[in-house]
Image (spheres, grey):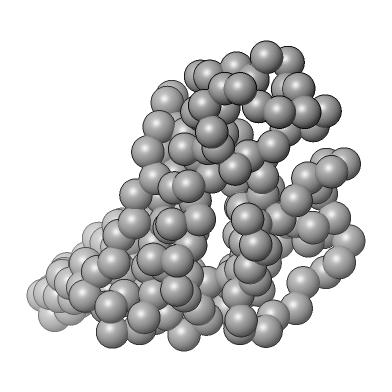
Amino acid sequence: MKYEKNERAYELDSATSVAAMLGEGEQVLWQGKPKKSAFILNKVLGMMPIALLWAAVDTALLVLVFTLDSPGVMRWITVGFVCIHLFPFWLWLSNVITASRRYKNMEYVLTDRRVIVRSGLVGIDYQSVSYKDIQNVDLRVGVLDKLMKVGDLYFITAGKGRNVFFDIERPYEVYKIAQKTVADIQTDIAFPNAYRPEENPGFHTTYKGEK
């Protein structure tokens, strides 16, 4: 398969990029990042309705307590309760504030062996899943995604959760690459190639393992 890279330019620390973590002989089939504008906008809009409604209700409670002739102790107890109760709002605000930093540390890679997701806020995390463990590859393109010309690619695994490529450009092309690679690898496992001779008498795939 032809190696493809997201056309949008981006910078990554070469010492911690996914390319520096590849095994010997491992080949990159596709590499990219989320579309920055779509990624940040989704972080802003994702929880915004709930967060703002939550904040409005708690603000109304504070106004009520301070409007009424309540004891000073009761007012401070209410303030403390509201600060804790506003957790969904703080979570949303944190996601908005850190969105740009999270974007900078994100990288998605499809190799001929596995799916790799690089992410992190302060530190850097790497998640990878072998193609043989993937049960489904799903593509989700919502209304906002369609407007931004992006999509989310989900790699579903048995008992290991999921790995997601959020807000990637050209999602249908990347989806085809992922689907074909998963099918080739899993078919290759299901139909052994007689210890991989020069000519493969097994089921035909484009995947060629190490000799």
The quarter of the displayed image where residue 149 is located: bottom left
Q: Quadrant of the N terminus?
A: bottom right
Task: Say if residue 19 shows up in the picture.
Answer: yes
Q: Residue at x 47, y 38 (%)?
A: 183
- In the displayed structure image, the side of residue 112 where residue 150 appears, left or right: left
Work out whether 154 lies above or below 90. above
The quarter of the displayed image where residue 140 is located: bottom left
Task: Say if residue 79 shows up in the picture.
Answer: no
Work out whether 33 lies above or below 40. above
Residue 63 in percent (x, y) is at 17, 78
Q: Quadrant of the C terminus?
A: top right
Residue 85 in percent (x, y) is at 30, 57
Q: Nearer the viewer, residue 51 or 183?
A: 183
Q: Residue at x 75, y 51 (%)?
A: 27
The quarter of the displayed image where residue 170 is located: bottom left
Work out whether 103 lies above or below 82. below
Q: Nearer the viewer, residue 14 or 171?
A: 171
- In the displayed structure image, the side of residue 11 where residue 162 appears, left or right: left
Q: Report the number of numbered marks.
A: 0
Q: Residue at x 73, y 22 (%)?
A: 196
Residue 106 in percent (x, y) is at 62, 65
Residue 65 in percent (x, y) is at 16, 71
Q: Residue at x 84, y 43 (%)?
A: 25
Q: Nearer the viewer, residue 65 or 207?
A: 207
- In the displayed structure image, the side of residue 92 where residue 133 appears, left or right: right
Work out whether 55 lies above or below 159. below
